[in-house]
């Protein structure tokens, strides 16, 4: 379901002024990604990024071009996800947060046997 422009505007405005709300957006995005819903998590992170205007600073911290930061949050462009995880880690540090997922990780559980 696509967000309407007015709802997106509401979310961004509230996130700019309400740290608890902004943190919850980040928490939900990471929870979605860890729960196997990368597309949903990326869309939520887009709202967080719109509110915080963090892309330029994040690019500097990750030592990548600022134009590439948006691609980090696109599951189709960043299929390996290494930089996405690094970016999320930096965002969590900025907010003074640590997270644990509340969802079961996607995919079948696998046990490893050692001979």
Image: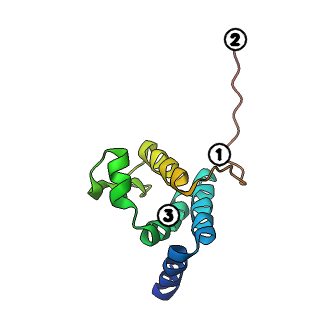
Q: Is mark 2 on a helix, strand or loop?
A: loop
* Image location of residue 58, percent across then percent down: 38, 54
State the CA–CA distance, disc 3 to disc 2: 43 Å
Give the quarter of the figure containing the C terminus: top right
The residue wearing badge 1 is 107
Q: State how far apart marks 3 and 1 are (Cα).
A: 23 Å
**Disc on the earlier residue, 2 or 1:** 1
Residue positioned 71% across, 39% down in the render: 109
Residue that protrudes farthest toward the bottom in the picture: 6
> Which residue is located at x 62 percent, y 62 percent?
28
Label annotation for residue 45? 3
Q: Is residue 56 above or below residue 79?
A: below
Badge 3 marks a residue whose secondary structure is helix
Residue at left offset 36%, top offset 60%: 55
Question: Which quarter of the figure is the N terminus placed in?
Answer: bottom right
Q: Quadrant of residue 73?
A: bottom left
Tell me, for residue 115, which label it has, or none.
2
Side of 9 relative to 69 (left or right): right
Q: Can residue 1 be seen in this view?
A: no
Q: Is residue 99 above or below residue 16?
A: above
Give the side of residue 76 with respect to residue 1, left or right.
Answer: left
């Amino acid at each position: 379901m696509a967000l309407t422009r007015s709802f997106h505007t509401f979310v961004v405005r509230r996130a700019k002024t309400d740290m608890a709300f902004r943190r919850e957006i980040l928490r939900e995005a990471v929870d979605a990604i860890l729960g196997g819903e990368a597309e949903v998590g990326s869309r939520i992170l887009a709202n967080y990024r719109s509110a915080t205007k963090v892309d330029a600073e994040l690019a500097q911290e990750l030592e990548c071009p600022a134009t590439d930061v948006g691609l980090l949050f696109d599951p189709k462009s960043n299929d390996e996800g290494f930089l996405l995880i690094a970016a999320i880690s930096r965002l969590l540090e900025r907010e003074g947060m640590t997270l644990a997922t509340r969802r079961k990780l996607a995919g079948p559980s696998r046990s490893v046997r050692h001979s």
